[in-house]
Image: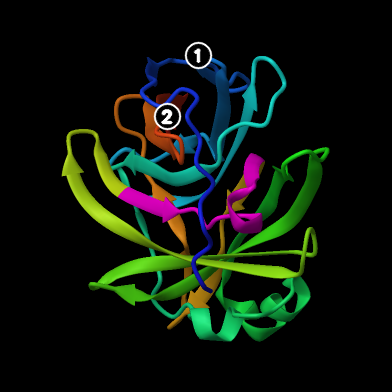
């Protein structure tokens, strides 16, 4: 996928916001920087987990990007998320997909090419605003595939496809990096491709991750976690093409399974 030219944006070029918020299961985090408004949330199941060893879970997350005055938001450039260290990703015996298999495919074709590698799915929305034209809403199902190992660490490949303003396939490889930063043990750093030559801005996304399979007589789960300190947590940073940076943290309660 070739690089698209980026549209220059000057508004909020130096704005940075920091929010660390404790919320309940049904609540969301709201972060505001000038005219830009970011809402996000997520959760996991089951809530009862062992304290001393990891157990299978599924988790989900969502986020929305808007402006207070209703104008076109700046385009998202990168999304960095760090996850709680009390867990792990399992890939033994799980089929892998590759960027090459997914290039130039629509959603149905991509899922047929690597059905055994699918570990998550969701939805993405954006708006495209060309000069002197009304905004065009676009959307696409998102599919998350187990990818090849990158620097000995697991990876996923995010796939999306849209026909507006022209047929375009988005294939984004993302490494799941092991880190040592206090409570956080994993990081994903997703570089968001330019939409419609830079005239498009992501406005909403949701994703659910979870997969189980059998390997050598054992049932394995893609995502696993344990309950330490009564919570699991994550924090994220959204970087926009105009220089804006928004940060937020989210905490979700868990219970120790007896």
The percent coordinates of residue 222 (x first, y second) are: 47, 62
10 Å crowding of disc 2: few (<14), some (14-19), many (20+): many
The C terminus, quarter of image:
top left
10 Å crowding of disc 1: few (<14), some (14-19), many (20+): few
Locate residue 39: give its quadrant.
top right
Is residue 128 located in the magenta-colored stretch of the structure?
A: no
Q: In the visual, does 104 lie left or right of 45?
A: right
The residue closer to the viewer here, 108 or 118, is 108
**Residue where numbered disc 1 is placed:** 34
Residue shown at the point (66%, 80%) measured from the top left: 104
Is residue 196 located in the magenta-colored stretch of the structure?
A: yes
The percent coordinates of residue 219 (x first, y second) are: 49, 69
Q: In the visual, does 24 lie left or right of 143?
A: left
- CB-based contact (under 8 Å), mark 2 and mark 1: yes
Q: Which residues are magenta?
A: 187-203
Q: Disc 2 or 1, which lies upstream in sequence?
A: 1
The percent coordinates of residue 17 (x first, y second) are: 39, 18
**Residue where numbered disc 2 is placed:** 244
Locate residue 92: give its quadrant.
bottom left
Label 1: which secondary element:
loop
């Amino acid at each position: 996928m070739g690089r698209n030219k980026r549209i220059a944006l000057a508004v909020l070029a130096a704005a940075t916001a920091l929010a660390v918020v404790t919320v309940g299961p049904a609540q969301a985090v709201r972060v505001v920087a000038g005219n830009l408004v970011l809402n996000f949330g997520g959760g996991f199941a089951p809530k009862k987990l062992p304290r001393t060893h990891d157990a299978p879970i599924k988790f989900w997350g969502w986020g929305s990007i808007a402006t207070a005055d209703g104008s076109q938001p700046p385009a998202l450039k990168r999304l960095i998320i760090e996850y709680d260290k009390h867990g792990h990703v399992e890939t033994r015996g799980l089929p892998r997909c590759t960027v090459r298999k997914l290039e130039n495919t629509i959603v149905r074709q991509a899922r047929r090419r690597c059905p055994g590698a699918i570990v998550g799915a969701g939805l993405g929305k954006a708006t495209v605003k060309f000069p002197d034209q009304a905004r065009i809403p676009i959307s696409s199902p998102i599919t998350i595939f187990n990818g090849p190992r990158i620097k000995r660490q697991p990876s996923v490949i995010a796939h999306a496809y849209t026909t507006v303003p022209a047929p375009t396939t988005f294939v984004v490889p993302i490494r799941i990096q092991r880190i040592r930063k206090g409570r956080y043990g994993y990081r994903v750093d997703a570089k968001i491709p330019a939409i419609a030559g830079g005239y498009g801005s992501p406005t909403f996304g949701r994703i659910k991750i979870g997969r189980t399979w059998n390997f050598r007589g054992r049932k394995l789960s893609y995502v696993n976690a344990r309950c330490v300190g009564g919570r699991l947590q994550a924090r994220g940073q959204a970087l926009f093409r105009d220089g804006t940076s928004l940060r937020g943290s989210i905490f979700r309660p868990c219970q120790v399974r007896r």
